[in-house]
Amino acid sequence: MAKLNLALAVHGRFHMFDLAREMRAQGHNVTLFTNYPPFIVKRFGIVQPGVKTDYVHGIMTRVFNLPVLSRMSGNLEGYFHRKFGRWLRRAAMAAEPQGGWDAILCMSGIALEAFQHYRNTKTLCILHRGSTHIRDQWDILNDEELRTGHKVEKPSRWIIQREESEYEACDLIRVQSPFAFSGFLKKGVPDSKIDLIPLGVSRAKFSATDEQVAERTRRITAGEPLRILWTGTFCLRKGAWDLRTLVNQLDPERFSFRFVGTIAEDGQELANELKDRVTFIPKVPQDELPAQYAWGDIFMLPSLEDGFAVVVTQALSCGLPAMVSKNTGSSLFIKDDVNGWVVPIRAPEVMRDILNDLDQNRAKLVGIIKSMNTLSPPGSWEDTAAMTIEDITNRCAIKSSMHAMS
């Protein structure tokens, strides 16, 4: 396969760092455009040359997103997105290799300016959308706001309009799950413009030892409270309202709950209410997550909408059966009563019944945990990069031929 010149752009990290690292490892010329400083990027296995950073943007967004300053300064979303987008366009043009970029891959929200420049060239413009169509996302979250009577953070009118402009300007929209794919179809985007490639997991970091599996099966068999783990962000979007209902319906003598991660503003009141039933642990570095997965017996993520939750594939790789909603992209990897359970959104009673059944039938749960080592693990980041490269190669050939004919 020919060596490709690829530009990957992200404000933050998301999955782009893992993708850039593995694309480089497979022999391609990859330049990463980010607002993280190079010394932090290096921690994720990506070294110079080929890292372009608007670190001033990164510092400014972190400062102005602090709660006190955020309330004082108002909504600066438009300013920061446009600022990074304009920088990206200039930086991509300045760093363009001989022969040009074969493809530019951008996270949604910061891609518009670059795509407007490259859309009529041979460069393939790929938009990476971390969730479903932004209007589908707004609809789901607005329904949750009406259901709970609590304010839910939703996409602003400004970012909805900007992302829809990006959908129009790009050649391809990349999503990570059938749920997200169907969301774009519902909003009228043709399937020829949508591509589905699941995200990977670092198998070297996330795996279960024989000792961890043995300890998990021992405590389950001994009748100790079943340990239910949730990692990520505690917020209404991720199903916090239904988790509260679930926790209050289960016997505290039979179930123990732990959450590891960030508590969002719209989840703080619920977290305070649940603090006697749920252990809340602040966000930990990714290298420390395997120890948290080792604590659990069952992983849970009842998200209302989630493009692809990598925490689920991490948990599965660590030998934890996972209970997730059908709107969580990583449900792709779960089969009921084999390595987890896929449940409807907003269905705490379904989760309650499954957990109570597992408590009464612990041999079934132990059997699931022991058999998980025999199942094919979720795809690796190497797999995701290889599928992405193959797809880019094929689509670049099509766009180049059309550009030559125009």
Image (cartoon, rainbow, N blue to C red):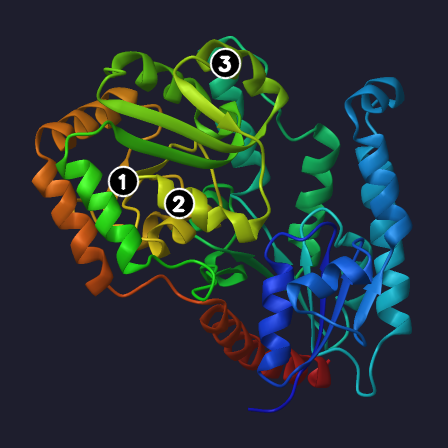
Task: Indicate which label's residue lies in the foreground, 3 or 1.
Answer: 3
Q: Using the numbered discs, state the Cα–Cα distance from disc 3 to disc 2 in whole angstroms.
A: 23 Å
Lower position in the chain sequence, tag 2 or tag 1:
2
Helix, strand or loop at disc 1? strand
In this rendering, the answer to whether 386 lies above or below 11 is below
For mark 2, what is the residue? 293
What amino acid does circle 2 point to?
A: Tyr
- Specify whether 114 is left or right of 268: right
- Towards the viewer: 357 or 79: 357
Point out residue 313 in the picture as x, y percentages from the top left corner.
40, 53
- Towards the viewer: 381 or 85: 381
Point out residue 43 in the picture as x, y percentages from the top left corner.
69, 62
Question: Which image quarter: residue 360?
Answer: top left
Lower position in the chain sequence, tag 3 or tag 1:
3
Q: Residue furthest bottom?
A: 2
Instruction: Tell me, for residue 126, which label it has, or none.
Output: none
Question: Which image quarter: residue 403?
Answer: bottom right
For mark 1, what is the residue? 342
